[in-house]
Image (spheres, rainbow, N blue to C red):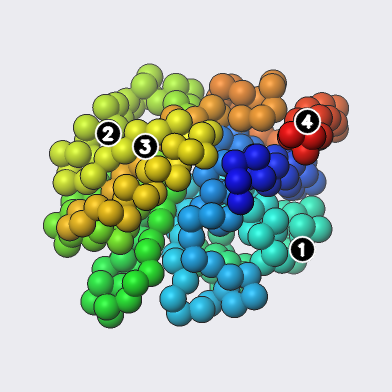
Amino acid sequence: MDNNELKVMANLVRQGIIEAVHSAKSGHPGGSLSAADMFTFLYFEEMNNDPRNPKKEDRDRFVLSKGHTAPGLYSTLAMKGYFSSEELLNLRHVGSFLQGHPDMKHIPGVDMSSGSLGQGISAAVGMALAAKMDNKAYRVYTLLGDGEIQEGQVWEASMFAAARKLDNLVVIVDNNGLQIDGNIADVCSPYPIDEKFKAFGFNVINIDGHDFDAMRDAFAKAKKTKDCPTAIIMKTIKGKGVSFMENQASWHGTAPNDEQYAQAMEELKKEAGELCQK
């Protein structure tokens, strides 16, 4: 895909997020929207994945460590063809396979169940180690929240990953600056994030998390890096794409009401129309 096609797809992913969370009347739109561009790039350009064969042995693995942003992952999987986009309207409903957090047993395309913050990166490290031990070529990607990295387990896993020289692992941090209680710097500052990962032995790349060229360059550099894992710290806007949600901590875990839903969808569809004219 070229960049404009990726922007169109990311817009559709954002529409799916809003549709799902509104239908559920609960969920986490803010961090899902901030990571929508990264979800899109991973599944439509970067990763070796096939919705016709979700469990193929040589697929790249993805672990959503910040599992509460499942609406973003689900919307991306639906757009990729792992299941119908109509299923997004069943998010968090009784009997739906689209639970509030990713479930590897029931959702096609989900490689690891996650939700308890800090644990996803450990699972990703284990997958990367398994690939090394089995002489497999697949790569492992995991997405963390910047509030999530306040968890100590993140750094235990990072220390292990560097010690084992897991150059097939890419840790992505969604640095939108906000968590459920407000500004991450005020709650329990993880800054400087890049220097911390460097201290733990990572190759570190800082990017704009809404810039596809920057993503393309970063992942290319990660693939060329040997004998250490890579951390991509992406600066993003929480609630990206919906004007009244952007940079507002209150939209961390709040579903839009009918009026807000209508406004959000109007904005996103207007943007989609403009992108399709380019």
Q: Are the two marked residues, 3 and 1, in contact with CB atoms closer than 8 angstroms?
A: no
40 relative to 186, above or below? below
The mark nearer the N terminus, 3 or 4, is 3
Which kind of residue does numbered mark 4 sit on? Glu
Query: Residue 177, percent across and down?
Result: 44, 26
Secondary structure type for disc 2: helix
Amino acid type, mark 1: Ser
Q: Secondary structure at mark 4?
A: helix
Q: Earlier in the sequence, mark 3 or mark 1?
A: 1
- Cβ–Cβ under 8 Å for marks 3 and 4: no
Choose the circle earlier in sequence order: 2 or 1: 1
Residue kind at label 3, given as amino acid type = Ile
Residue 207: image quadrant is top left
- Res 51 visible: yes
Residue 262 lies in quadrant: top right
Q: Is 190 left, or right, of 257 in this rendering?
A: left
Q: Tell which tag, 4 or 1, sits nearer the viewer.
A: 4
- Residue type marked 2: Asp
Query: How many other residues sit within 10 Å of disc 2, few (<14), some (14-19) or many (≥20)?
Result: some
At which x and y percent is residue 168?
Answer: 30, 61
Cα gap from disc 3 to disc 2, whole angstroms: 7 Å
Say if mark 2 contacts mark 1, CB within 8 Å: no
Q: Return the residue nearer the eye: 217 or 229.
A: 217
| Residue underneath mark 3 | 233
**Image point (69%, 22%), residue name:** 243
Q: Which residue is mark 4?
A: 274
Q: Nearer the viewer, residue 111 or 183?
A: 111
Q: Residue at x 77, y 57 (%)?
A: 85
Q: Which residue is mark 1?
A: 84
3 and 2 marks in contact (CB < 8 Å): yes
